[in-house]
Image (cartoon, rainbow, N blue to C red):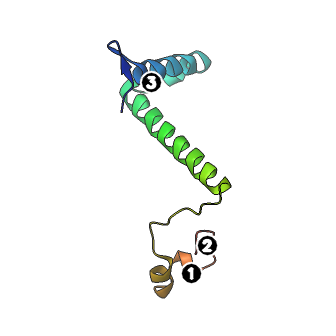
Amino acid sequence: MHAEAAGLNFSTMFAESVRKSLIEADPSFDDVHEEVFANELTTLRFELFGLARLGSRRRAGHQPALLVSASADSQKGGPLSTGSPFSV
């Protein structure tokens, strides 16, 4: 899941650029391992994309699919049976 062109990995370049900017603002950020930061940044980008996608689908009138069955959960007295905003 890395954008590459002409042998350049743009995901890595972006992570390095962000990391350098953060180090300028707070030198203690230099203690953060480069590879760990790049992985966390990629995860954050996925999460933000997912939230943006969810928001655009909601505005279009779609309801998000749940991974947990609300009816099965309510029979067990789980969190979805207690007025959770995720209940269906």
Name the side, left or right, on which 44 lies relative to 5. right
Ranked by sequence position, the earlier of labels 1 and 3 is 3
Disc 3 residue type? Asp
x 39%, y 26%: residue: 33
Disc 1 residue type? Ser
Tell me the element at label 1: helix
Q: Is residue 5 above or below residue 47?
A: above
Instruction: Please give the residue where the numbered disc 1 appears in the rendered image.
Output: 81
Q: Which residue lies furthest to the top in this view?
A: 6
Tell me the element at label 2: loop
Label 2 packing within 10 angstroms: few (<14), some (14-19), many (20+): few
Q: Where is residue 50 in the image (x, y as percent from the top left)?
A: 52, 47
Instruction: Please give the residue where the numbered disc 2 appears in the rendered image.
Output: 84
Residue 21 disc label = none
Q: In which quarter of the image is residue 3?
A: top left
x 46%, y 85%: residue: 76
Which label sits in the foreground, 1 or 3? 1
Q: Where is residue 19 in the image (x, y as percent from the top left)?
A: 50, 21
Residue nearest the viewer, comparing 39 with 53: 53
Label 1 packing within 10 angstroms: few (<14), some (14-19), many (20+): some
Quadrant of the snapshot with the C terminus: bottom right
Tell me the element at label 3: helix
Instruction: Please give the residue where the numbered disc 3 appears in the rendered image.
Output: 31
Are the residues tagged 1 and 2 within 8 Å (C-beta)?
yes
Give the CA distance from mark 1 to mark 2: 7 Å
Q: Where is residue 67 in the image (x, y as percent from the top left)?
A: 44, 66
Give the CA distance from mark 3 to mark 2: 40 Å
x 38%, y 32%: residue: 36
